[in-house]
Image (tube, rainbow, N blue to C red):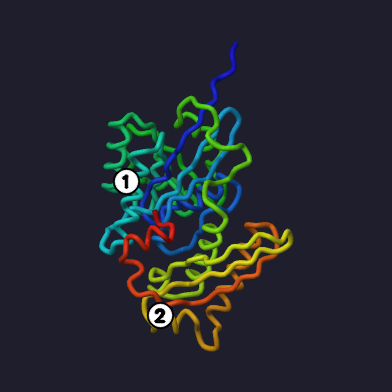
Amino acid sequence: MPDRAHRAGVVALLGPTNAGKSTLLNRLLGQKLAIVTPRPQTTRSRILGILSLSGAQVALLDTPGFHEAARPLNRLLNEQVAEAARDCDGALLLVDPRTGWEPEHARLAGELGRRGAPFLAVVTKDDLAPGAGAGVPGDLPVLRVSARTGEGLRALRESLPALVPESPPLYPEDQLTDRPLRFLAAECVREAAFGELSQELPYAVAVEVEEFDEKRPDLVRVRANLLVERASQKGIAVGAGGRVIKQIGIQARREIEALVGRKVHLELWVKVEPRWSRRPKRLKSLGYW
């Protein structure tokens, strides 16, 4: 009996903010790739995580959560979701059991169905609401998972190859992502900023890496700017005596060291850049497209 043909393609993770897309991506990969915080709308960029399985390679595309759009940044994030849904080979529609199946889920399911892209509804966070009804239509295939406990992940992983077409591998087997380390380092800084800054300020913050020097085999030098839009925000981000920016730097350096597997020297500065979040060209230069 001939061996089954190899399968490969892109599976988009689609769902509302805080549905657990990034956490699920990291757990499926077995390595932290996407930043995770308790705050909604943390993910700003599409991140591809490459999962090589026996007989299949599935490129998992993490996307921002769909949400009401007002500012240019929010509209850009929603455009990323729409483009991922249009271009993916298959999809996982993530449903938080506490909020259930939403109109946007139905719209995306209809769009995927019209173009013949296979998808699964995945009820996440089953450890927080075990067995809770999520309102997923009864005619759709559904899996329940918990990225925290690992429940349901084996079944989900085994279901992924059926969502992509027959194809040779798209990437080398040992490649984890299509994003450069420079971008992932910026995300480590942004994750640390989300953890140290309170209320709405994290949403006014971006990170720009000006230098990422890997010349030394034992040390990576990183120089980055934490961008804010107003001088008052700079004062908060720096903190009294530089306490806040120091803590952001300590946490970010640990995460970057885990990422690159060697020591990191991190220089971190806070820079005021008015209206960075309202300028589409600037958003793209920061990697949010």
- Is 97 on the left-hand or right-hand side of 184? left
Q: Quadrant of residue 111?
A: top left
Answer yes or no: is residue 272 visible.
yes
* Mark sitting on residue 154: none
Amino acid type, residue under disc 1 in the picture:
Ala
- Which residue does the image show at 61% across and 30% down from the upper left? 54
- Which residue does the image show at 48% across and 42% down from the upper left? 60
Amino acid type, residue under disc 2 in the picture:
Gln
- Which residue does the image show at 58% across and 45% down from the upper left? 176
Q: Quadrant of residue 116?
A: top left
Q: Is residue 195 above or below residue 125?
A: below
Residue 260: x %, y % from top left: 65, 57
Residue 69: x %, y % from top left: 27, 59
Q: What residue did someone put label 2 on? A: 233
The answer to whether the residue labelled 2 contacts the one labelled 1, judged by CB atoms less than 8 Å apart, is: no
Check the picture and name the quadrant holding the N terminus: top right
Q: Residue furthest top?
A: 1
How packed mark 1 is, by other alpha carbons closer than 10 Å (few <14, some 14-19, many 20 or more), is some
Residue 70: x %, y % from top left: 25, 62
How packed mark 2 is, by other alpha carbons closer than 10 Å (few <14, some 14-19, many 20 or more), is some
- Which residue does the image show at 27% across and 58% down from the upper left? 68
- Is 74 on the left-hand or right-hand side of 132? left
Determine the secondary structure under disc 2.
helix
Between discs 2 and 1, the one toward the N terminus = 1
Q: What residue did someone put label 1 on? A: 82
Q: Residue furthest bottom?
A: 241
